[in-house]
C-alpha cells in the first residue's frame, strides 16, 4: 500500500491531470480522443508539449520525425543522459492517459526541480514520441525507431486513408525525411530509459496497488487468416454437406481461447472477423479474421503459435475449407533491465508502496529504445476495470501524485553504475 501524505507531489498530481485534460483538447474528432500522426491536432499537441517543457526549464528541440525533446542539462558534461518519455499519438476514439502520462509526469517533476534550482550530474531528456500506435500510416513506433536509428525509410511511401503518403505529410509540416538519420542517438549517450505508463489492464486495480514494476514487454505474433468455404442457401444445404467458413473460423477462435488459457502470461485475441457478402439466409463462404498471440516469454508464445497453426490446418481439412494464413507482425519479448527494476522497487519501498512485478502485454516505445539503452517501465493503476484504448480509460490524481513521487525518488537516487 502507499502512504497518503505525498506533500508537494499532490500538487504535481493535480498539475499532471489538468494538463492531460488540456492536451486532450487537441483531437481530430469532437467528443472523441483521436490524435494521429502529423494531423493538425497532433501538431497542436506537439506545440503545447514543447511550451510546457520550456516552462519547466528545459531546452526544447524537434527532430526530423516530429519527436519533441526536452533536455534538462546536468552539471557533468561527460555524463550520459537519463531518458524518459512516452508517445502523444492515440488510437481512434481512445483514452487520454495512454502515452501522455509518461510525458507530462516527468515534465512536472523537472519543473519542480527547476524551481528549486536543483540539477543532477546527468542530463534528463524527456521525449514526447510523435508516433507509437501506427494508426494513420499503418507503421507503429516511428518516433522511437528514429531515436534508435532503426527507422525503415520504406514506410515513408505508406499512404493514409486519403492517399497522402507519410513523406508528403512530413514535408507539408516542415519536417525533412532526408534528415531522419540525424535523429538517432548513439548508444553510449543514454544511461537508461524509464517510461511511466498506465497499466492498460486490471491487475493493479484488483490488487489495490497504485504502482507496478514491469518485468518484460510481451512478444507478439499477428496473422490474417482467410478462410474460403462454399456459400449456399441456409435452408437447403444439409448440415453434414456444408463447408461453412464462419463455423470454421468460430472453431478456430474457440481453440485459440482454450490454448491461451493453458499458460500464464499467454493471451490470444481475434480482434476482427469479417464475413464477405454476409446475409441472414446465406451460409458464409468467405471469412477473414485477425489473430494476435502474445506472451512475455518467447518460447511459450512460439509453442502456442505452432499448436494454433496445426489446429487451423486440421480444422480446415476436416471441414473442407481452403485457407491462407499470412503473418503480418512478429516481435520478440523485451526484458526490462533487472538493475533498473530493483531501483524502482527501492524507490517504491522508500515511499510506502508495495513492490509488485508484472509483465506488459501491450507494446511500448521501450521495445525499441531497449536496442540502445537499458530500459525499465513503471506502471500506474488504471481505473474503470483497467479499461484502455477506450474513452472509458481513467486514472486518479492521487495515483499521479504517488507515481511522480516514486519517479522523482528514482531520479534523485539514480547512479550510472549497473550494480550487476
Image (cartoon, grey):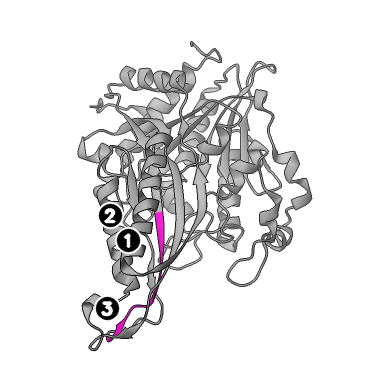
- Residues at marks 3 and 2 touching, judged by CB atoms closer than 8 Å: no
Pointers 1 and 2 in contact (CB under 8 A)? yes
Magenta residues, start to end: 281-291
User: Picture coordinates of residue 50 (x, y %)?
Assistant: 60, 45
- Is residue 50 shown above or below 187? below
Please rate how many residues cluster around mark 3, counting C-alpha atoms within 10 Å: few if below 14, some from 14 to 19, many from 20: few
Q: Is residue 285 magenta?
A: yes
The residue that disc 1 covers is 315
Give how far apart the Cα atoms at labels 1 and 2 are. 10 Å
With 268 as the anchor, is 154 left or right in this view?
A: right
Describe the element under mark 1 as helix, strand or loop.
Answer: helix
Does residue 104 show up? yes
The earlier-in-sequence mark between 3 and 1 is 3
Q: Is residue 145 magenta?
A: no
Per the image, the residue denoted by label 3 is 241
In the figure, 116 relative to 100: above or below? Answer: above
The local crowd at label 2, few if under 14, some if 14 to 19, many if 20 or more residues have their Cα within 10 Å, is: some
Residue at the right extreme of this rendering: 178
Task: Find residue 39 and report its horizontal and vertical position in percent.
Answer: 59, 62
Q: Residue at x 57, y 18 (%)?
A: 120
Task: Where is residue 220? Give x, y as percent.
Answer: 44, 45
Q: Residue at x 32, y 61 (%)?
A: 315
Amino acid at each position: 500500500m502507499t502512504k497518503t501524505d505525498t506533500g508537494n507531489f499532490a500538487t504535481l498530481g493535480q498539475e499532471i491531470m489538468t494538463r492531460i485534460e488540456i492536451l486532450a483538447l487537441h483531437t481530430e474528432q469532437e467528443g472523441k480522443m483521436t490524435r494521429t500522426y502529423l494531423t493538425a491536432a497532433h501538431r497542436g499537441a506537439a506545440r503545447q508539449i514543447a511550451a510546457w517543457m520550456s516552462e519547466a526549464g528545459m531546452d526544447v528541440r524537434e527532430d526530423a520525425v516530429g519527436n519533441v525533446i526536452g533536455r534538462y542539462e546536468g552539471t557533468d558534461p561527460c555524463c550520459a543522459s537519463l531518458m524518459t518519455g512516452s508517445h502523444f499519438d492515440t488510437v481512434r476514439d481512445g483514452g487520454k492517459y495512454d502515452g501522455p502520462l509518461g510525458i507530462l509526469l516527468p515534465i512536472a517533476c523537472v519543473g519542480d526541480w527547476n524551481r528549486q534550482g536543483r540539477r543532477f550530474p546527468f542530463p534528463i531528456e524527456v521525449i514526447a514520441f510523435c508516433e507509437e500506435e501506427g494508426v494513420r500510416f499503418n507503421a507503429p513506433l516511428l518516433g522511437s525507431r528514429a531515436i534508435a536509428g532503426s527507422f525503415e525509410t520504406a514506410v515513408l511511401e505508406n499512404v493514409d486513408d486519403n492517399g497522402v503518403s507519410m513523406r508528403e505529410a512530413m514535408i507539408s509540416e516542415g519536417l525533412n525525411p532526408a534528415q531522419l538519420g540525424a535523429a538517432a542517438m548513439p548508444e553510449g549517450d543514454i544511461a537508461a530509459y524509464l517510461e511511466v505508463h498506465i497499466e492498460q489492464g486490471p491487475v493493479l486495480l484488483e490488487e489495490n496497488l497504485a504502482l507496478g514494476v514491469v518485468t518484460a514487454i510481451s512478444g507478439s505474433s499477428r496473422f490474417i487468416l482467410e478462410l474460403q468455404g462454399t456459400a449456399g442457401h441456409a435452408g437447403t444445404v444439409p448440415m453434414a454437406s456444408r463447408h461453412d467458413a464462419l463455423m470454421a473460423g468460430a472453431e478456430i477462435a474457440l481453440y485459440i481461447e482454450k490454448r491461451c488459457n493453458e499458460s500464464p502470461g499467454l493471451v490470444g485475441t481475434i480482434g476482427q472477423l469479417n464475413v464477405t457478402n454476409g446475409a441472414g439466409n446465406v451460409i458464409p463462404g468467405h471469412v477473414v479474421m485477425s489473430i494476435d498471440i502474445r506472451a512475455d516469454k518467447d518460447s511459450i508464445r512460439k509453442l502456442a503459435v505452432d499448436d494454433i497453426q496445426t489446429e487451423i490446418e486440421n480444422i480446415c481439412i476436416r471441414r473442407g475449407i481452403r485457407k491462407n494464413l499470412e503473418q503480418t507482425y512478429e516481435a520478440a519479448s523485451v526484458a526490462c533491465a533487472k538493475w533498473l527494476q530493483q531501483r524502482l522497487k527501492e524507490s517504491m519501498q522508500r515511499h510506502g508502496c508495495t513492490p509488485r512485478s508484472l509483465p506488459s502485454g501491450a507494446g511500448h516505445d521501450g521495445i525499441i529504445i531497449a536496442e540502445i539503452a537499458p530500459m525499465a517501465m513503471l506502471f500506474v493503476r488504471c481505473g474503470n476495470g483497467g479499461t484502455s484504448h477506450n474513452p472509458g480509460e481513467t486514472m486518479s490524481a492521487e495515483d499521479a501524485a504517488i507515481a511522480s513521487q516514486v519517479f522523482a525518488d528514482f531520479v534523485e537516487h539514480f547512479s550510472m553504475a549497473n550494480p550487476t
